[in-house]
Amino acid sequence: MGKEKLNRLQRQWKGESFVYCLLMALAGGVLLTAVLHAGMGWPLWVGGPAVVLCLSLSLALSPFWRVTLADTARYLDRMLPELEESCGLLLRGGAELGPLEKLQAARTAEKLARIRAPHPLRRRLIFATGLFVLAVLLSAGISGMSRKKKESKVVVTREAAAKEKAAPGIRTVSIRITPPAYTGRPVRSQSDFGLKVEEGAVVSWELETGSAVDTVEFIFNDSSRVLLRVADTGHTVWRFTEKAMRSGFYQVRVGRQMSGLYQLEVRPDEPPQIMIVTPKPYTVIDYGEPTTIPLTVKLKDDYGISDAAVMATVSSGKGEAVKFKEQEIRWNRTFPGDQPAYELSRTLDLKALGLKPGDELYFYCRAKDNRGQESRSEMYIISLTDTAQLMSLEGMTLGTDVKPEYFRSERQIIIETEQLLKEKDTIAVAAFHQRSNDLGVDQKLLRLRYGKFLGEEAEEGEPGGSPGDTASFGAFGDATKILDAYTDKHDNAEDATFFEPAVKQQLKATLNEMWKAELQLRTFQPQAALPFAYKALRLLKDLQQQSRAFVAKTGVRVTPLNPAKRLTGELKDIQAPVQKAAAVGGLSEAEVLRIALGLLEARRVGRVEMSDADSVLVQQVARRLGREAAARPGEYLSAYQALRQITGEGGPAPKTLAADIPMIERAIRQLLPVAEALPVAAQQTADAGLSQLYFRHLNDPAGKP
Amino acid sequence: MIPQAYIQGGACLVLLVFLLSKERLRPDRSHLAWRVVATVLAVTALAGIVLPLHYYREVKALPAPVAVLQPGTLPKGMVAVDWQRRLMKGEKLEVQGHWSGLRAKLLLMGLGGVMDSTVTDGGFSLGTVPAQIGNAVYQLVAVSGADTLEREDIPVQVETGKPLKVLILAGAPGFENTFFMNWLASDGQQVANRTEVSRNNYQSSFANMLSRSLDVLTPALLDGFDVVVADSSALPAAGSPGGAALRRQVEEKGLGLIIRVDSAGMKGVGWGKEGLRVLTRDSSMRAAVDGRLYGSGKVVFTMLNATYVRMMAGQRQAYAAYWSTLLRRVSRETGPGEEWQWVPELPRVGEPVTVRVRTGAAAPVQGLVSEESGSTVNVYLAQGAVLPFEWRGTYWPTAVGWQMLHTLQGDTTWAYVWPGAAWTALYGQRRLQEASAHRGKEAQTGLPLREAVPIPTYWFYILFLLSVLFLWVERKMAGMSGPIMQ
């Protein structure tokens, strides 16, 4: 019984000592991990091995977990005098004990059962727990500090986010902004002086000053001043209302104190933006293509779109007999005026609009926003090919009797195909197939003839090789073939090997169409071959007309000159004209800005005194910056404010002035174009006339130098 | 004087002949051959003792130099940087150099922003057109990720020069001269234009200058211009007084002349074609502008007579760059001022700077350096021994930043002094180069590959003694067995 108690105590103390070691290990491990992670950037999973390390260390160092039963007994003996030093007896087995010892053991066991066991490790456990908590807090602190340092590093490199400086003398400010009704935006209020409002919004300020003052004034753009209205008897609440129309900046003057410059940015209402997604700006519809065009338009506005439509114009006829018909195509929806973005689509049926082959359709989209501003898109053109005109030979038969062979071939193929289609129902199927195949062969021959220009397959599929193909095995060392590749054969027009790349591209496209036509013809579908044949003809015609040059009529007869009367005018009454011009005196605007940049740089590296002329120059630049800040306060206001402080007008210069100078320089550089080169004279070398002496002596060696 | 060795050698030879003859004359012929050999050996040994004899042998390899420079690591960073210190307005600043080390991003920052940047691990070249007029300090920064590896100051001076005076002689009114004149006038240059509008009727225009008579070109008139831009038909004939005055001005006074020609006139008609150098070529690689020196002036023939098209197309920068370069090359040079130079080119605080001034002043020149703080330091200059217009001195800068250098009468020049810790990699590289050059010099002291070693004389003494001993023993032996020679 006593032994069990001893066992129990031993196990308990062992457990406590393990907990103690674990706590110490955890404390050490957590602290170590925090230090490594924050100081040297090691990843967090280092904590595991760190804790294991500390655990092994603490287990090795602390002896408490090695407690044995004998130790327990000895400890109890020492700590509890009433046990009469006899716990050792309990450990020995009952058989070994003498009668006296058994008695004593029984007594000891009894006493042991009653007394409260001591806690040898209590203080240590408390200490370990405290240490662990401390370690956790410390590591949290370390990692928090390191994180803050990282963040602060990033912030310093960028400009410090502008925290608005409070105006002196003002305790609170409340600004209510009422956007115009048509924008649909709610009323909002803010307590900062810097404003970003919609155009036409009504802004009302309500200021509360710390003490009673006589006047509170707003100074807009350094020029116009307005007094605020006092709203209570104690002269502490002041009000002002205005409609915001233009951007600028303003200052608050309370009594004699001036605040900094605050931004007043007004966002204008832009007209709606129209983007036509399909079709492309210029579309040509060839024979055989569908005559319905999908029209997709994206509309975007700041606040809302109230109306949109498509204005279409159909032009028919040619030359002086052109007729235009204008019509408006509406979308099948209404525009209530509160949605800012739309994606609209519909199909334009060209036949329904009245287009015939050869006509063109010009259309553009227009949109109106709920403020009434209108905008329109670019003009888009759709044209239908006129096949009848393609097939005609007008303009080419004038003056020449020779019909160009290739055009007749393509036209001939089309004519014969259409003939075949007309006769389709009257001839036998085999004959139809035969004729279709023949037309396909014709088309193939035509294609091959053109293909020669591009160095493609010659007749009967014999590879002709490209003009630059001298590396083939058989041609190695063949002088004529090498020369062939690089000479320009311009005496034989049909074998010309040099075309411009653009012309070659067009020829390739033509060949592509011819091949498609041939495919259809050979597979006995002449109906499907027609569109391709027409397209090939159109491309060929474009190619030919591209290089056409128009020459004026020659053979103009003018009256011949009369040599007797030539150059016999009387000139004595004509006076020699004299013109004078003088550049505007002084420095140009750009030069003033550049010289100011140089002065600011000097100031940045430490030279604080400026001469009077330089100060005048810098004030001129400050005024220019002020004008720019009034127009675009977001970009130039802070630079203007800093420059005013340098010139002394903006109140006492704060300590961080040197850091503001790069910002001012950046703003000034935005106003400058790239410097233009100046012609100046070179300077002679300073050699006290030595080279002049040498030169004179060169020219006159005998005489005096 | 016959050298002593030859006398001694001759004497030994005579002795040998005498002794041999004595031997032959001895009646006793026993061991004659041996006696002859011994005699020859004895005399040779005597000669060897008396004459200075040498033999040549190869020199052993030198031991390695004691101090071999083995730098632990080569200097890393900007090991070489250069840029133009003084620029004219509109000229492009180019910072070029070499970066040694890992790949880094180099930024040229200044006037509140980044002007140019590049990523390199070797040579780099950054450029910008400076926006200021006056002195500015840009920075050349090397960054890698979020770390700044090196940051150095790049001081730049931008100046505007004095305006040019240009005279335009045109054979007919045209757009080219109109645009040219307008551009020059807008920049503040002084321009005069004489255009022939009818036979012997000229129109004169003046911009930024007082009007004067341009009908006849007199030396006094031409003195007041730096460049003359003329059509080939508007130039006065070579024989006329105007032509002669123009020629003299170009040849002796350094006036610049630009002649607008067509392709036939490019051969330099009237002005010779020796030394004609092509300045610009057109797109088919034919010469479009070429020029030559003519006496102390320059003559340029240009076929590009439609440059106004560039101005009309809005390319004002390109137009200005072309004409500025051409005019700068051709125009008369202005009088010499002072030229300051300092070595090293990147001086640091506390290190000595050698200052050199070239000036035409007759009196002794004293240099003054005014630092940022306002204090003025006297730099005492010594006149050069060979070139009397060159003065040198040394001074130790104590403050970082711009220093104003000037003499008592002259204009000011600006120099920049860096802090002591700047340009460590560059100076390290320089020191390394100097050390290896010095080591290379040491290895070339020209020691001979062979040396003459004197033959030690004790051999000859031994030989002499032995041969004389043999002769004496032989004599004694012969004397014992035969009659003694009288």
Image (tube, coloured by chain):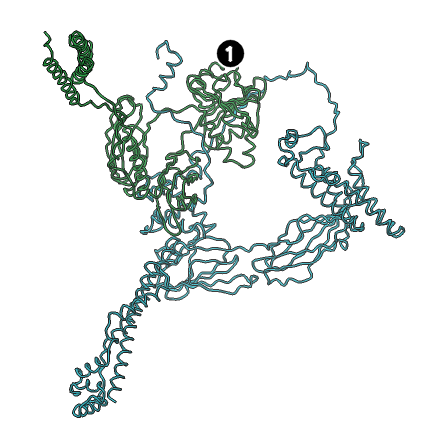
Residue type at numbered disc 1: Gly
Q: Chain for mark 1?
A: B
Give SS at disc 1: loop
Image quarter of the C terminus of chain B: top left
Chain letter for the part of the structure drawn in green: B
The residue lying toward the viewer, choosing from B436 and A69, is A69
Measuring from the top left, give residue A572's x and y in whole percent. 59, 17
Relative vertical location of residue A535 with respect to residue B202 in this rendering, above or below: below
Name which quarter of the figure residue B363 lies in.
Answer: top left
The residue lying toward the viewer, choosing from A668 and B103, is B103
The residue lying toward the viewer, choosing from A278 and A145, is A145
Which class describes the residues within 10 Å of circle 1: few (<14), some (14-19), or many (20+)? few
Measuring from the top left, give residue A34's x and y in whole percent. 32, 64
Question: Going 32% across and 32% down the picture, which residue do you hit?
Answer: B412
Residue A458 horizontal side relative to residue B193, left or right: right
On the question of residue B346 being in view, the answer is: yes
Measuring from the top left, give residue B456's x and y in whole percent. 18, 23
The residue lying toward the viewer, choosing from B356 and B365, is B356
Name which quarter of the figure residue A332 lies in.
Answer: bottom right
Chain letter for the part of the structure drawn in cyan: A
On the question of residue A359 being in view, the answer is: no
Residue with the mark numbered 1: B239
Residue B365 horizontal side relative to residue A156, left or right: left
